Amino acid sequence: MKIESSFAIIDIKKGREKLAKHFEHRPRLGECPPSMRIPITITGYLDGQHSRDDGESIEFSMSVDSIKTA
């Protein structure tokens, strides 16, 4: 199966305050400036459909086994 995505949302528990402070001055419009980007690798699995097809995409929920910053 081949899938493609250009957007995701992740729920952060531990470290959320520090992460929020990091992005405090991020411009609201446009791409995130390279100096503010935090590369991550997420390992887990898709476990269900989260939304309906809007004609462009369908959101799916993911259970995260691990997350690592680069």
Image (cartoon, helix red, strand yellow):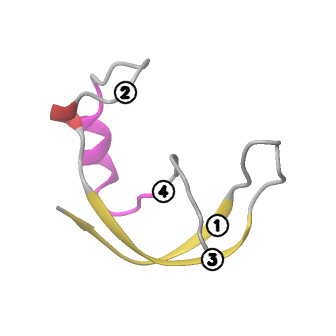
Q: Rounded to the nearest whole Å, what is the CA distance between mark 2 and mark 4?
A: 18 Å
Query: Quarter holding the N terminus?
Result: bottom right
Marks 1 and 2, the one that precedes in the sequence: 2
Residue under label 1, please give it.
61
User: Tag 1's secondary structure?
Assistant: strand
Task: Choose mark 4 or mark 3, whichever is in front.
Answer: 3
Residue under label 3, please give it.
1
Residue under label 4, please give it.
10
Residue type of the residue flagged with mark 4 = Ile
Q: Rounded to the nearest whole Å, what is the CA distance between mark 1 and mark 3?
A: 17 Å
User: Tag 2's secondary structure?
Assistant: loop
- Crowding near pointer 4: few (<14 within 10 Å), some, many (20+)? few
User: Tag 4's secondary structure?
Assistant: loop
Marks 2 and 4, the one that precedes in the sequence: 4
User: Tag 3's secondary structure?
Assistant: loop
Marks 4 and 3, the one that precedes in the sequence: 3
Query: Quarter holding the C terminus?
Result: bottom left
Residue type of the residue flagged with mark 1 = Ser
**Position of 58 compared to 65: left or right?**
right
Residue type of the residue flagged with mark 3 = Met
Marks 2 and 3, the one that precedes in the sequence: 3
Residue under label 2, please give it.
31
At horizontal 24% and vertical 53% (from top left) the residue drawn is: 39
Task: Choose mark 2 or mark 3, whichever is in front.
Answer: 3
Residue type of the residue flagged with mark 2 = Glu
In the rendering, at what x and y percent does residue 33 appear?
A: 25, 27
The part of the chain drawn in magenta is 10-24
Q: Is residue 23 above or below residue 9?
A: above
Q: Is there CB contact under 8 Å for labels 4 and 3?
A: no
